[in-house]
Amino acid sequence: MHTNSLYQEVILDHNRKPRNYGKLDHANHQAVGHNPLCGDRLDITLQLENDQINDIAFQGESCAICKASASMMTAAVKGKSRLDAETLIHEFRELATGKLDTTHPHHLGRLTVFSGIRDLPTRVKCAILPWHTLHAALNSITSASTEENHDSAHAVVSSKS
Amino acid sequence: MSPATVSLKPEISVDFDAEKIRADFPILKLKIDGKPLVYLDNAASSQMPQQVIDRLVRYQTTQHANINRAVHYLSEVATMEYHTARCKLQQFINAREDREVIFTSGTTDSINLVMHGYGRKFIKAGDEIILTTLEHHSNIVPWQMLANEKGAKIRVVPINDKGELEVDEYEKLFNERTKFVGLIHVSNALGTINPVQRMIDFAHQHGVPVLIDGAQAAPHITIDVQALDCDFYAFSAHKLCGPTGVGILYGKAALLESMQPFKGGGDMIASVTFEETLYNTIPHKFEAGTPPIAAAIGFGAAVDYLSAIGIERIAAYELSLLNYATERLNDIPGVKIIGTAAEKTAVISFTIDGIHPHDIGTILNQDGIAVRTGHHCAQPVMQRFNVPATSRASFAFYNKKTEVDALVAGIKNVQKVFL
Ligand SMILES: Cc1ncc(COP(=O)(O)O)c(C=O)c1O
């Protein structure tokens, strides 16, 4: 794959003008994601009612891949049920790690612009971090990290529900 | 040498034939995605010339056996070659005796050896260890572990805005509790060359031993441990065109003898009963188990190769690359060089306004350009400059000006992508 196909206009656009950027005042679920390899961090706040994501926002310090992924993710899951969001999380992880068979029906839509990331193993974590963090927020897990089993002591996470 | 063989030709020739040198490095012929490889990550690990590769092949095909153990032919050859490698390293750093050179698995291992062998024996509660802001994590974490274990304290030498150590502040840190100094010779994150001679002399006035982390210095600066009078000096082969998995710890013989072993096992003993073990003499006391024999021999060949070119010539050529690259990068709007010390090796850490280092690294890679992005295992340095990470181009003597040009074009391309 040529890397140019990763830094496509969609991704660059979401990086320049991230959607749903900021912090919700009325959030009832939140989590902080951390990529200890590069120090990137991401806050996700969301409002869940009757198992539906009424509102969601993110903010943080990160690379373009991570920020665009977070921006497109929030746009994709806003208004969706928790179950639909979990399906997207699963499918996105499969896509980023090259395990998703895109010839079969899936729900990712434009998020498939991230398919090229599977050829850049060092960057897969950047794309996945927002989705890990969303999963943590939805499930009120106290931390999300791109490193499994990582000591979360420095990724101070508050998750309330 | 008889006087008749002395050549009057100047030893340092002015022109440095980078093309001829490049031909020694097979990996430099690689194409990445159809583009010629521009390898600018030499501070992380440098590449290996054919001469060293050939030495490894010769060892592996005609000389390999375990050392120090058997009376058969191959074991004797391997033992001798391993010892020869130690002597080459001894000469390379001008150590007084070969037994002052211990083969380790690398700089990290060398520092941990000193922490366990010296630190755990001699550092007590309330003692102070001086480190600097520029240290690589490998010269921070072991001392933190020791400080936690013993109730000792770590004092840190600050740096100025150029990334230079504030030596006056260093001198003020000394008191009667100061028991050890750990000092990076050249910063891997910024390239700053530290005034180690002055700092060692000052520590010695207070009777405090000094460990120098020379991982980034040994490839670029002639090391004379006797002139420096440092107590310990550590570096890795893989940053000197040698193999991974091997490095050395130099230590003054008397100090090494006073220390406790780091690892227990075969070869480090004189005799073993279940009641008591008598340790072997140095360096063997610190080389438990089968060492990386092939890698050590390759290390010897690597310092031979570098010495044949001449570290001074290497440094002079690299400095010309550094000056050229600094000038070119300073000309690009939005690019900021982090680390502008007066004395530097050919390392340029930089940021580009509004663009994350990881994106820079990935896009440069599409032009075949290899740089390092991240915190460079030196998070305190990043914190000092208030950046989470930088991109780092680090040059070796086999790089050339046209590769600096490629980097400049690559950076402009990154900026275009994010326009
Ligand atoms: C200054 C410095 N110290 C220590 C190390 C650690 O070396 P190694 O990983 O070979 O043990 C490095 C390598 O990155 C370094 O640059």
Image (cartoon, helix red, strand yellow):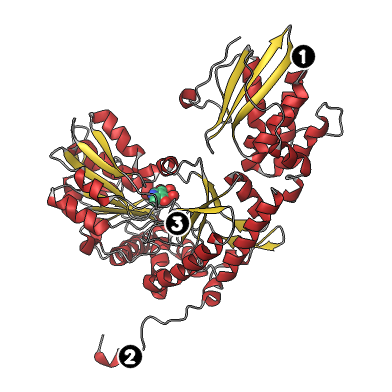
Q: Residue at x 40, y 60 (%)?
A: B344
Which numbered disc, 2 or 3, marks the residue that appears first in the sequence? 2
Q: CA distance from mark 1 to mark 3?
A: 53 Å
Disc number for residue B356: none
- Image height check: is A5 above or below A110? below
Task: Characterize the local packing of mark 2: few (<14), some (14-19) or many (20 or more) Cα atoms within 10 angstroms.
Answer: few
Using the image, name the chain to which the residue with label 1 belongs.
Answer: A
Circles 2 and 1, Cβ within 8 Å, touching? The answer is no
Image mark 2: chain: B
**Contact between labelled residues 3 and 2, with CB atoms less than 8 Å apart:** no
Q: Is the residue marked by circle 3 packed among few (<14), some (14-19), or many (20+) residues within 10 Å?
A: many
Out of B357 and B118, give the one closest to the viewer. Answer: B357
Left or right: B340, with B50 as reference point: left
Return the residue at label 2.
B8
Disc 3 marks a residue whose amino acid type is: His
Does label 3 point to a residue whose CB lies under 8 Å from ligand 1?
A: yes
* Mark 1 surroundings: few (<14), some (14-19) or many (≥20) residues within 10 A: some
**Relative depth, front residue between B220 and B323:** B323
Please name whichever residue, B376 or B298, is drawn nearer the observer in this view of the structure.
Answer: B376
In this rendering, do the residues under marks 2 and 1 share a single chain?
Answer: no
Q: Amino acid at mark 2?
A: Leu
Chain of residue at mark 3: B
Is the residue at mark 2 from the same chain as the one at mark 3? yes
Instruction: Say which mark, if any, is on residue A81.
Output: 1
For the question of whether residue B97 can be seen, the reply is: no
Q: Which residue is mark 3?
A: B238
Nearer mark to the viewer, of 1 and 3: 1
| Residue B281 x %, y % | 20, 51
